[in-house]
Image (tube, rainbow, N blue to C red):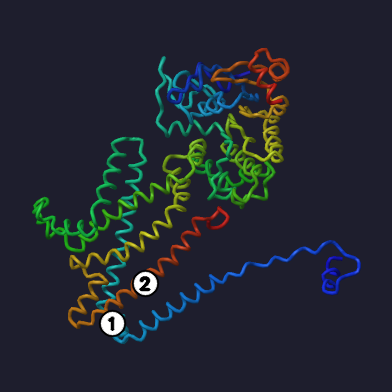
């Protein structure tokens, strides 16, 4: 199987705080990788370095064979101009913990914004696609609504449809259910589960252990800016080798 | 059942039903009533005194209200306000961008501008520009006095002043937009211009419009200051007439009423603009 995301010895610090201390991770095409770990372990930062929302201080990340923010020349990575970064980023969908829908735009306008303005697709075509995507996340009747008129779970499903509208090769989820009321978590996980069943390559940062067990091909456990342990869910969740993993699971299960 | 109980309540039912829910009696606000009456009486006295005081000469007010020279003055006031607001906000937006820039030099320049032009009283600034010929007698071979007519001085002075305040209003509006909005737009690959135009600015407008409306009304009346450099605005036109006829109060009333009329119209317009930018937020807050 081909590798979709290749992360090699990535380091990142915010001032004196080392958030990522050398991360190596490969994500294969068509697989679901779930990243677990205590808060402050660097999970979200890792996810954000993949689509270059954060710049890594050291190391290299390629998505589908190309680095997002750089051009490789020999042993150097030259930072790319923003226009090019934005173009490369459109092959990655990103779903935020707080949805970050555009509150002044309708649901439909939220979904077609990127295809129309970043991919220059005809508006009509983008709208047809958007309606199809909204139907897929169970919100066919909400296209004229404004985000604030929707529940948190519905908003997050719109955000997923918005990310899918770019037809991304890779989807990144940053704690997609953490801001939701407990009774709304299920509907969002259902959508992600459906995407997994369709063979979408995804990296999901979450605290939902049961979801990880069910959907993940690989579970990655992070702590203190390092990957402590990774493997199939059965191994990492049911028979963890590392003490840190066991301690974390004992707390959350 | 409950309605039966209520109907029988006065005649004490034999079988007691569930205990009656007590009725809520609002507090009597005597103080509020007294205050309202006092204020209304005072207001009535003030209005009568204005109406009955013959020195206001309301007939003279009516006579001059739509005089050609007054209307021409009003027209100058209106377009001067429009030009100053437009240029002021254009320059102010640029300055706000400077102040929010990653470039420390631009940030410092933006800060310096705002500091300087908020420090100089507008009257002083107008007089300085009016007398700029003393500092620079010629510009590119042209006499400065010919280059800067009083109206040009008014536009330049008021615009530079306005821009300093507009910069702060725009900056505040931009800062009020959630950081996550920009990140989401970046993650979706929207260009810098598109992010600004489509995502940040419309949301910033919600915080920009109320103070901008305030500034617009302030500027409308603030333009009356240009009468000191003999620019023929609404106030100056009224002054020209009363210098001739000595009917000072009625002509000041003419100017006052016009300012009030335009302010009212602008206020109504502002309400509509605010409503437009509040869409998607479930009503104005």
Q: Is residue A221 above or below residue A95?
A: above
What count of labels does the image hold? 2
Q: Is residue A30 visible?
A: no
Which residue sits at x=60%, y=25%? A38
Q: Which mark is residue B260?
A: 2
Quarter that holds the N terminus of chain B: bottom right
Residue where numbered disc 1 is placed: B64
Instruction: Categorize mark 2 by other alpha carbons within 10 Å: few (<14), some (14-19), many (20+).
Output: few
Residues A65 and B220: in front is B220
Determine whether the residue tagged by mark 1 lies in a helix, strand or loop.
Answer: helix
Identify the image quadrant of residue A250. top right
Residue B108 in the image: state x and y as whole percent: 29, 39
Residue B256 in the image: state x and y as whole percent: 32, 74
Q: Give how far apart the Cα atoms at labels 1 and 2 are.
A: 16 Å
Determine whether the residue tagged by mark 2 lies in a helix, strand or loop.
Answer: helix
Residue lying at the far top of the rendered structure? A241
Residues A174 and B217: in front is B217
Residue B219 in the image: state x and y as whole percent: 32, 62
Q: Are marks 1 and 2 on the same chain?
A: yes
Q: Is residue B32 above or below residue A56?
A: below
Question: In the image, is A65 to the left or to the right of B71?
Answer: right
Q: Label 1: chain?
A: B
Q: Which mark is residue A40?
A: none
């Amino acid at each position: 199987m081909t590798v979709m995301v290749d992360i090699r010895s990535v380091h990142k610090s915010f001032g004196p705080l080392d958030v990522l201390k050398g991360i190596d991770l490969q994500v294969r095409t068509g697989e679901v990788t779930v990243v677990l770990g205590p808060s402050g372990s660097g999970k979200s930062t890792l996810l954000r370095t993949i689509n270059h929302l954060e710049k890594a201080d050291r190391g290299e990340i390629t998505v589908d064979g190309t680095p997002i923010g750089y051009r490789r020349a020999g042993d150097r990575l030259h930072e790319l101009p923003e226009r090019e970064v934005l173009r490369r980023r459109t092959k990655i969908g990103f779903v935020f913990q707080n949805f970050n829908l555009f509150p002044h735009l309708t649901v439909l306008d939220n979904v077609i914004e990127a295809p129309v303005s970043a991919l220059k697709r005809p508006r009509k075509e983008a709208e047809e696609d958007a309606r199809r995507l909204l139907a897929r996340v169970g919100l066919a009747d909400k296209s004229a609504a404004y985000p604030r008129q929707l529940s948190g779970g519905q908003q997050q499903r719109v955000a997923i449809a918005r990310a899918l509208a770019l037809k991304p090769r890779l989807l990144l989820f940053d704690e997609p259910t953490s801001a939701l009321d407990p009774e709304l978590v299920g509907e969002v996980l259902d959508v992600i589960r459906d995407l997994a069943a369709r063979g979408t390559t995804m990296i999901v940062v979450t605290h939902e252990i049961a979801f990880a067990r069910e959907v993940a091909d690989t579970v990655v456990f992070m702590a203190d800016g390092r990957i402590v342990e990774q493997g199939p869910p059965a191994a990492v969740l049911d028979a963890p080798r590392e003490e840190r993993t066991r301690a974390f699971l004992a707390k959350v299960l | 059942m409950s309605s039966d109980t209520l109907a029988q309540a006065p005649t004490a039912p034999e079988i007691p039903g569930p205990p009656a829910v007590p009725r809520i009696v609002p507090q009597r606000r005597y103080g509020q009533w007294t205050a309202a009456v006092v204020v209304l009486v005072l207001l009535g006295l003030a209005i009568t005194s204005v109406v009955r005081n013959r020195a206001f000469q309301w007939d003279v007010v009516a006579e001059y209200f739509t005089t050609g020279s007054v209307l021409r003055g009003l027209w100058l006031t209106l377009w001067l306000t429009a030009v100053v607001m437009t240029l002021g906000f254009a320059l102010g937006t640029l300055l706000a961008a400077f102040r929010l820039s990653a470039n420390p030099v631009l940030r410092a320049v933006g800060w310096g501008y705002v500091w300087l032009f908020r420090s100089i009283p507008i009257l002083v600034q107008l007089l300085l520009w009016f007398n700029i010929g003393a500092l620079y007698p010629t510009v590119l071979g042209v006499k400065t006095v010919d280059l800067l007519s009083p109206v040009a001085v008014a536009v330049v002075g008021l615009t530079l002043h306005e821009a300093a305040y507009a910069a702060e209003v725009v900056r505040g509006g931009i800062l009020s937009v959630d950081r996550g909005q920009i990140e989401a737009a970046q993650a979706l690959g929207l260009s810098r211009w598109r992010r600004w135009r489509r995502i940040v600015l419309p949301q910033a407008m919600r915080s920009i419009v109320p103070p901008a409306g305030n500034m617009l009304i302030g500027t409308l009346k603030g333009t009356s200051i240009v009468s000191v450099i003999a620019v023929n605005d609404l106030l100056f036109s009224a002054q020209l007439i009363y210098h001739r006829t000595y009917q000072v109060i009625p002509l000041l009333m003419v100017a006052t009423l016009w300012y009030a009329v335009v302010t009212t119209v602008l206020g109504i317009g502002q309400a509509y603009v605010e409503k437009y930018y509040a869409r998607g937020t479930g009503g104005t807050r």
